[in-house]
Image: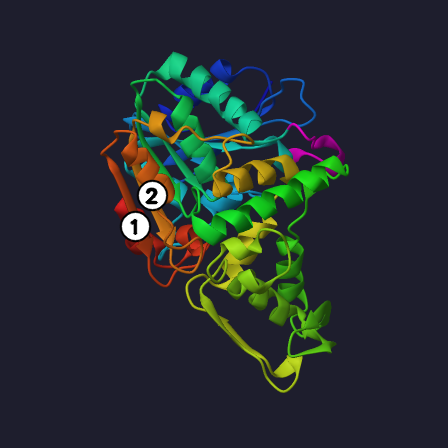
Amino acid sequence: MRERQHGDAAGGIGLLTRIERALGTGTAAYLPGDGWIRLTLPLDDGGPAPVTVDVIADAARAPEGIAYLLPGGGLNFAAEFLTPGGRGGHSLAHVLRRRGLLVVGVTPREDAATAAGITAERGLEAHRRDLAGVVGALDSVLGLPYQYVGHSAGAALALDAASHDTSPRLRRVVALDTTGPYTGDLAVRAADTRDAYATRLAQGFPVVDPGLAAVIAKAVADPDGVSPAPWPADRALRFTHAGLAHFALVRTAALPGPANWIYVQGHSAGSYDFGATPAEDRFALTRTPLATWHAATSALGSGLLPTALMRDLAAVWAGDDDTYRIAWDRITAEVVWVNTELGRGDHPRGAELIRAGGNERVSFTVVPGYGHGDIVWAEAAASDVWSRF
């Protein structure tokens, strides 16, 4: 069944129709743009919530390859990769399209799910199986070279998928601000994080709600209002809504929670200075404006994270192969791994393990002055980051 808008450009619609047929049943929506056309198809496979596939095709030329875009935890394709961030209103999805690639966004089931629909089985392996189903279906009809491009949890998924993907058409993995195994004390801390999520699962809590979207929405709607969060300078007082949002973005590592320590500083580069009262705090974001963060988080579905996914990611950080193992030595495609100085930081152990397995086509770099989300939304991301891959 299909809902189609008029104005389809020649060429693009035919390709997307073939893709829709290959992916199977679901109610598709076609959206024509300026020189491109987008297909959005929630896959109806009988699950409690669908995997949603977005495909963006250039209207004037056939694609030379495919980029599978994999969003970070709690995000979806539109929020992460279609939110304009670069100068001139660019988004990563359209930058890749202009390079001659068919852009395929794969949004995990939890984005369309209620909390009750997310189970203890929604770990990293389940996400990999869902992705493999999409890739296999499109590969069977298109036969194009392809790459995985993921951010955060999506980057871990890209690396995991590549370790199981033996197709000669898989050419590259782009991992944006993610973490392989830590070493030393940080590996011990990661094991504690794994245990915290495993305990939550055992206690019957299969869902994590980061809550950042609501915090940002309140900061935009009522910046001077009083939030419920204690103010660190005097815990008898409370942050303003704007103050809390900026503190959560800039100083993520200082927030409570089992996994916030993995950030060197935070989600977004910026500054936060306490004043005499919460209303007198001074803060700023230096790479990604709050309006961009608001646009991105406003595009979310549930915004929820499966606890099982967080447990598996923490196991990867801890190097705990018994709980979850990424087979680093089986990744043979080129790997471009780009971290941020203020986000996941300079922890190259995952890239080193890929090289140790015999793959010499591995690069690991750290972008200075960038936070975790800036890598996809910063005003200068196109030149500072996206030009690297």
Q: Quadrant of residue 230?
A: bottom right
**Foreground of the two, 322 or 163:** 322
Mark 1: few/some/many CA within 10 Å (<14, 14-19, 20+) = some
Furthest-top residue in this view: 140
Can you say which quadrant of the picture contains the C terminus? Answer: top left
Q: CA distance from mark 2 to mark 1?
A: 6 Å
Q: Is residue 241 above or below residue 97?
A: below
Q: Is residue 8 above or below residue 209?
A: above
The answer to whether the residues at label 2 and label 1 have Cβ atoms under 8 Å apart is: yes
**Foreground of the two, 248 or 83:** 248
Res. 236 in view: yes
Residue 6 rendering spot, x and y as whole percentages: 49, 29
Q: Is residue 371 left or right of residue 348?
A: right
Residue 44 rendering spot, x and y as whole percentages: 62, 20
**Foreground of the two, 223 or 316:** 316
Residue occupied by mark 2: 337
Q: Is residue 385 above or below residue 60?
A: below
- Which mark is on residue 365? 1
Q: Residue at x 50, y 60 (%)?
A: 266
Residue 105 rendering spot, x and y as whole percentages: 47, 33
Task: Give yes or no for residue 243 being in the magenta stretch.
Answer: no
Dot 1: element: strand
Q: Is residue 110 left or right of residue 106?
A: right
Q: Is residue 200 left or right of residue 337?
A: right
Dot 2 or dot 1: first in sequence order is 2
**Foreground of the two, 170 or 233:** 233
Residue extent of the magenta highlight: 112-121
Give the amino acid type for the residue marked by disc 2 in the picture: Trp
Q: Main secondary structure of the magenta part?
A: loop
Give the amino acid type for the residue marked by disc 1 in the picture: Thr
